Amino acid sequence: MRPNILIIDDDEKIISMLRRGLAFEGYDVKTASNGADGLRAVLNSDPDVVVLDVMMPQVDGFEVCRRLREGGSTVPVLMLTAKDEVEHRVKGLDLGADDYLVKPFALEELLARVRALLRRKSEQIGGSEQAVVYEDVVLDVDSREVTRGGKRLELTAKEFELLHLFMQNPKRVLSRDLIMDKIWGYDYSGESNVLEVYIAMLRQKTEEHGGKRLIQTIRGAGYILRGDN
């Protein structure tokens, strides 16, 4: 079965270009020209990847992503934005987007990112597990709940995935490039501090009840999950 890609964008030129490019690559492509129709299309077509424009009237891309995640959808979302500021990128990722692409972009790069999202989705389906435990942290994959010392931690989708990666690789140094590839599907090549922002937020939440630091920085090498300070 061919992967199903849903494009949500109010720019007909963008829709036409993406539809042709994705169809040429063998994908089944569906489109929606506004956020409200896009939300309905997700429910009706169960896409494998959503390509979502941010700047749309009435229901913008941020709101679409928020509603999808609050409704329990885990469909990979690639956001398209004309805004290159870090705060806008982080806002989209924090709402549950899996990746973003700044306009104008090359079709080849978008296709590469779609392939990366599909690959990650396939790996996640193939590697099902119920719970991961490290010291007093319990991460339930099915319910996507995390507790530390019995107290629930409220994590965003990306924070959950980042912690899951660390807990699958305890006491192993994970390089920045590896983390970016596994969590965001490609390498930011040092052009953004988004990983550092997420590490800081994850540390704050895992330590908010007085727990010791588990995610350590290994200068010049990356990060590691271990209990020593």
Image (tube, rainbow, N blue to C red):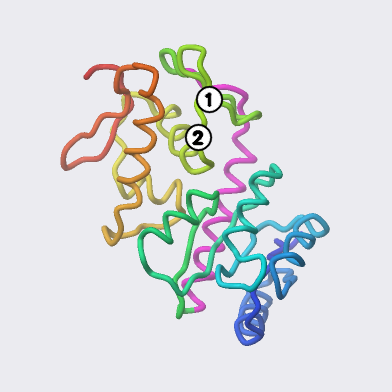
State left or right for residue 215 relative to residue 38. Answer: left
- Tell me what residue is drawn at x 58 percent, y 27 percent: 145
Amino acid type at circle 1 is Val
State left or right for residue 220 relative to residue 104. Answer: left
Using a 10 Å C-alpha cutoff, classify the residue at mark 1 as few (fewer than 14 neighbours), some (14 to 19) or many (20 or more).
Answer: many
Q: Which residues are magenta?
A: 107-133
Q: Answer above or below: position of 8 versus 69.
A: below
Q: Answer above or below: position of 92 versus 196.
A: below
- Tell me what residue is drawn at x 35 percent, y 17 percent: 211
Q: Secondary structure at mark 1?
A: strand
117 inside magenta stretch: yes
> CB of mark 1 within 8 Å of CB of mark 2?
yes
How far is the residue under mark 1 from the one under mark 2?
8 Å
x and y percent of residue 38 in the render?
A: 73, 65
x and y percent of residue 132 in the render?
A: 52, 22
Question: As drawn, which residue projects farthest toward the front?
Answer: 58
40 inside magenta stretch: no
The answer to which image quadrant residue 10 occupies is bottom right
- Tell me what residue is drawn at x 60 percent, y 82 percent: 14
The answer to which image quadrant residue 24 occupies is bottom right
Question: As drawn, which residue projects farthest toward the bottom?
Answer: 13
- Give the dominant element type of the magenta stretch: helix, strand or loop: helix
Along the viewing direction, whichever of 72 and 45 lies nearer the viewer: 72
The answer to which image quadrant residue 134 occupies is top left
State left or right for residue 90 relative to residue 56. Answer: left
Amino acid type at circle 2 is Leu
**Which residue in the protein does label 2 denote?**
155
**Which residue in the protein does label 1 denote?**
146
Mark nearer the N terminus (1 vs 2): 1
Q: Secondary structure at mark 2?
A: loop
